[in-house]
Amino acid sequence: MYKILIIEDEAPARKKLKRFLDKTGHSYKIVAELETVSDAKLLLSQTQDFDIIFSDIELRDGNIFELYNEVSLNCPIIFATAYNAFLMSAFEANGIEYLLKPYSFERFSNAWDKFIRLKANSNQNYNELIGTISHLLKSNKENNIGYKEQFAIKSNKETYFLKVEDIVCFQADGGIIFAFDQLNKRHIMPYATLKEIEAFLDPKKFFRINRSENIQRKFIDKIERYNKNTISVYLNSQRKTVKTSQNKTSDFNAWLGI
């Protein structure tokens, strides 16, 4: 039985991962499901009795590499993330695969099979990991097909196309992702999480200001202090107002260059 640690802050992503694990047919036990860097740090300081870690990268309280740069791990990690910018950091942190969300069962199965091979024959670990470098770089190149210029939005009667340049912000609400355009019209996006959408957005133009909202830079009219650690952001001729979360305010100011 394989002992598994899951570090992932999105419930749909955890559900999908467990569904794919069931499909492998292998016996496994999930030791813990963690949603924050701080919880992971606490657990890994107490035990590392895992065979494999499935890890997201950007969590609600920070970047997981804050932890992996401090802790020496003795098991491999399969990363699953919506961002393709952390490829080499993942390899340096015991990573054996890098699944770019939304990933298919075929991609997951290939990653799982690699773990099984490494577990079964430790003498081949070195060659496997060396081969991982070229594989990950090739995979990253293939997946980095550029940022989307438009999204296809399907309704019961039609499919229409929403241009990214016209999107003021994205908002997660009740398990549904909405995009708001310049007329403040709301569009239901065909994605389960903001992280999936962010893989297709230019991070120079879009920024996640809190857990549920991602805004486009060019629609920012003004900002003002809301309280000590939070900023109010006025968008699209002040038709919409959003607020940064406390842990995003500093990064948001840096992104704006102020």
Image: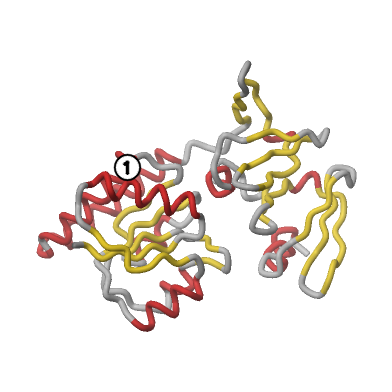
Q: Residue furthest top?
A: 157
Residue 220, position in %: x, y? 81, 49
Question: Is 2 on the left-hand or right-hand side of 87?
Answer: left
Residue placed at 74% from the left, 35% from the top? 186
Residue denoted by label 1 = 107
Q: How many marks?
A: 1
Q: Nearer the viewer, residue 46 or 15?
A: 15
**Image quadrant of residue 28?**
bottom left
Residue placed at 72% from the left, 66% from the top? 249
Question: Is 52 on the left-hand or right-hand side of 214?
Answer: left
Q: Residue furthest bottom?
A: 46
Q: Quadrant of the C terminus?
A: bottom right
Residue placed at 31% from the left, 66% from the top? 94
Question: Is 79 placed above or below 101 here?
Answer: below
Question: Is 109 placed above or below 185 here?
Answer: below
Q: How is the image coloured?
A: secondary structure
* Badge 1 element: helix
Residue 10, position in %: x, y? 51, 55
The 10 Å Cα crowd at callout 1, few under 14, some 14 to 19, many 20 or more, is few
Q: Nearer the viewer, residue 89 or 195?
A: 195
Q: Nearer the viewer, residue 216 or 20?
A: 20
Question: Is 136 placed above or below 69 here?
Answer: above
Amino acid type, mark 1: Arg
Q: Quadrant of the N terminus?
A: bottom left
Residue 170, position in %: x, y? 68, 44
Residue placed at 45% from the left, 45% from the top? 101
Question: Is 104 placed above or below 194 here?
Answer: above
Residue 42, position in %: x, y? 44, 80
Question: Is 243 on the left-hand or right-hand side of 104?
Answer: right
